[in-house]
Image (spheres, rainbow, N blue to C red):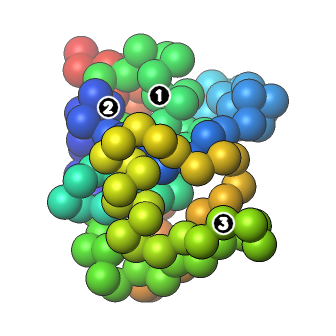
């Protein structure tokens, strides 16, 4: 796990605004950041954790805990029959900013994504 500068990360799909607010309330109640986002390590694409990525930006965090993955080790598929999702298309869309709609790409990561515990000040760069 690594703290990554939020400005380096690139989304691959949209997010649900209501879901962002619900997760944000829980994070603020917990008082700590306890789950990393899953990121492709070469292009810094957010493969899982788009809502938490949006929350980090809303809260003005400079850093966010990330579990970095080699995309060759990650399984990817589409949740929508009208979209073809491959590693190559995800990378292309993420780099270009032409992201998929919310709930299009799904990933399975090797092993379990670990939990973490970061105080907000450490994520703000304080």
Q: Which residue is mark 3?
A: 83
Q: Could you tell me if the residues under marks 2 and 1 are in contact, i.e. CB atoms within 8 Å? A: yes
Mark 3 Cα within 10 Å, few/some/many (few <14, many 20+)?
A: few
28 or 73: which is nearer to us? 73
Mark found first going from the N terminus, 2 or 1: 2
- Nearer the N terminus, badge 3 or badge 1? 1
Indicate the position of residue 100 as horizontal and vertical percent values: 58, 50
Rate crowding at label 2 as few (under 14), some (14 to 19) or many (20 or more) other CA atoms within 10 Å: many
Element on which disc 3 rests: loop
Q: Which residue is mark 2?
A: 6
- Looking at the picture, does residue 55 appear above or below residue 52? above
| 122 left or right, relative to 42 | right
Above or below, 118 against 17 in this view is: below
Residue furthest left in the image: 42
How many angstroms separate mark 3 from mark 1 (CA)?
28 Å
Where is the N terminus found, in terms of image quarters? bottom left
Count residues near mark 1 (Cα–Cα under 10 Å), then give few for <14, some for 14-19, many for 20+.
many
Question: Which SS class for mark 1?
Answer: helix
Percent of width and height locating residue 16: 74, 36
Q: Is residue 18 left or right of residue 98?
A: right
């Amino acid at each position: 796990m690594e703290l990554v500068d939020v400005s380096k990360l690139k989304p691959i799909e949209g997010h649900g605004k209501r879901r962002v607010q619900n997760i944000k309330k829980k994070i603020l109640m917990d008082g700590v950041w306890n789950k990393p986002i899953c990121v492709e390590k070469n292009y810094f694409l957010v493969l899982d954790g788009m809502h938490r990525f949006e929350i980090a930006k809303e809260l003005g965090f400079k850093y966010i805990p990330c579990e970095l993955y080699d995309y060759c080790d990650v399984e990817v598929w589409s949740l929508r029959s009208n979209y073809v999702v491959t590693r190559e298309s995800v990378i292309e869309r993420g780099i270009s900013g032409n992201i998929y709609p919310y709930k299009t790409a799904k990933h399975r990561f090797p092993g379990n994504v670990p939990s973490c515990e970061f105080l907000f000040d450490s994520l703000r760069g304080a």
